[in-house]
Amino acid sequence: MQRRNVAEMLITAISLAVAAVPEGLPAIVTMVLALSVSRMVKVNTIVKRLPSVETLGCVSVVCSDKTGTLTQNRMTVTKCYTDGKICEPKRLNRRKDRYFLEGYALCNDASIRGERIGDPTELALLDMAAGFEIQRERLEESFPRTQEIAFDSERKMMTTLHRGEKENVSYTKGSPDEILERSAFLLEGGGRIPMTPEKRREIDQVIHAFTGEALRVLALGMRNPASGLKENGLTFIGFVGMADPIRPEAEDAVQEFYRAGVKTVMITGDRIDTAFAIAKELHIASEENECISGEELMEMTDEMLAEKIKKVRVFAHVSPEHKVRIVAACKKNGEITAMTGDGVNDAPSLKAADVGIAMGKAGTDVAKNAADIVLTDDNFATIAKAIAQGRCIYENIRKSVIFLLSSNFGEIITMLVSVACGFAAPLKSSHILWINLITDSLPALALGVDEEENKSYMDRPPRGKDESLFAGGGLNCTCFYGALIALISMVAFLQLPVGILLRAGNQITPAAIRTLLVDTELLNRCQTYAFTVLGMSQLFHAIGMRDVETSLFRMNHLENRLMIAAFVIGMGLQLLVTEVPYFVVLFGTCRLTLLEWVKLLVLASMPLFAHELLVFGSCLGEKENRENRKEATGQAVSSGGRWS
């Protein structure tokens, strides 16, 4: 109907199609995720699967092992119970407590000769024995190990058989409950006496006292003489209480998770008393009804567990197999779950979790291969840093997407409005492609790698797993800035013809403007105006998109040097196509005067002015809300006074 040139309109349509689709978006997102891997390394986190970086941002439950993650995994024997007495390790007697000291040294796979090798729990036992000049390797020369049953998470015990000068002897160490249950005799007063119910209750009370002090308890039994590897009919020798100091930064990390709306769940193989004592110290749990044992878990159906887990913060005396059920219960409640693990048996739970987290130091290769990320320092606080980075990275991707879509939306609206009014196209196809080149690359990438170190992402709840990129005002932001960019571009395009009509005293109508735009020279200058404003406004828009909630004057622009470079390069390229003769001819633009540049710069900076106005309005709204809440609180207090 407008009788436009078909070939020209076809080229313009193709250019618009290119503008409508942010073809740089997949590359930008991939580059942002790839660059984020190096940022995660700085917080001692190795990312094995790129999508897990984004998933970290919406984690709502962190299920963490206790030993080595929440604690330092530096075991020290602080208390002993043997011969019916509680004492410190240094109060033991080498001759009188021979079986106690030698048993813990022989039923042991660690070594402290030269380099310290082995599990921290077993190393602590060897340190205790070393205080009495007992060394495992030397002791095994007199009592060589002939057979063994390795520790098993199901049995929670380890047994070794040794050949003596006259007869064989076997030692079994492990969970105090298991050892006590399998003991038929008790070593007391230098002799073996039957294990009576009264003695069991007495020993159990001491065990409870140890675990109530957050000590890890490991018991020891023996068979002498031993005819083979048997784990029943044992003689109960005693047990040790080991302290594992809490990581100083773990408590702060738990509090940070609380502020961030992330629940912390502690999982341990220790007794429920020990687990609760440590959980209480870390402020993970405050009441005993927030703890359940592996035995209780076994009796629950999946539906019962899913309901119970809403209030549970500690799982004690559990095995790695239980972790899979814990993850499933969390996911059934709609939680995004992160699970830590280090052993071979932890692999299924790491796979089942939304984010599997393996330990870099203590973790097995199987656990590391099954996990999504690996902590190089085995530290719980590192998980908090990783989640903060995950939230920051997601927010950066979101900013890049909204920036690209709002900028492209502005280009499309500009062209559609002009065509609908019957005007000549405000942009040539080369202009559209050029603008996409300078805005879909560096500025979008600069937004994607923004760090914003002063902005806390852990003071807000995690986003929902199905939350859209446009949630939280994202769609409004896209439409508003797209419309604003289109508006100022059209103002720039119509500035000259409207000025001519005003000076001539003629009525401003679409028909009058169309008549003036027939002039090729005037049309070229109008297109140059629109081209320049559209390109520069998107560069200004990128600066504001760094943080839509913070004033431009409160941002630390030196935090993102790539954004500064992108802005300068973009402006330089825009200057190139209007001032260098070769490019002026190539793009069909016009050279601009200094006054024209100033006017167009002011017009192009409108997205930043709009950004400041929106931030100012938001601050006023928050201030008014605070005053209203304060007033409501005052009225409530006053009302309470009258009724009291």
Image (cartoon, helix red, strand yellow):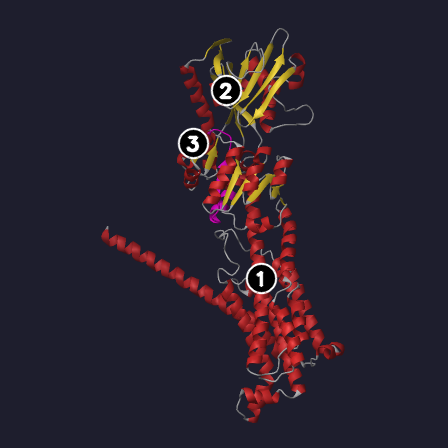
* 404 to 233, vertically: above or below: below
In the rendered structure, which disc, 1 or 3, sits on the residue that comes first in sequence? 3
Describe the element under mark 3 as helix, strand or loop: helix
For discs 3 and 2, the disc positioned in front in the rendered view? 3
Q: Nearer the viewer, residue 610 or 262?
A: 262
262 drawn magenta: yes
Q: Position of residue 305 (x, y in %)?
A: 43, 38
Of helix, strand and loop, which one carries label 1? helix
User: Which mark, by number, is residue 299?
Assistant: 3
Q: Is residue 586 above or below residue 402?
A: below
Estimate the x, y position of residue 495 in percent, counting from the top left.
58, 83
Q: Nearer the viewer, mark 1 or mark 3?
A: 3
Above/below status of 607 relative to 321: below
Q: Which mark is residue 233?
A: none
- Tell me the element at label 2: helix
Task: Give the residues in magenta.
Answer: 252-271
Tell whether position 440 is magenta.
no
**Labelled pair 1, 2 in contact (Cβ < 8 Å):** no
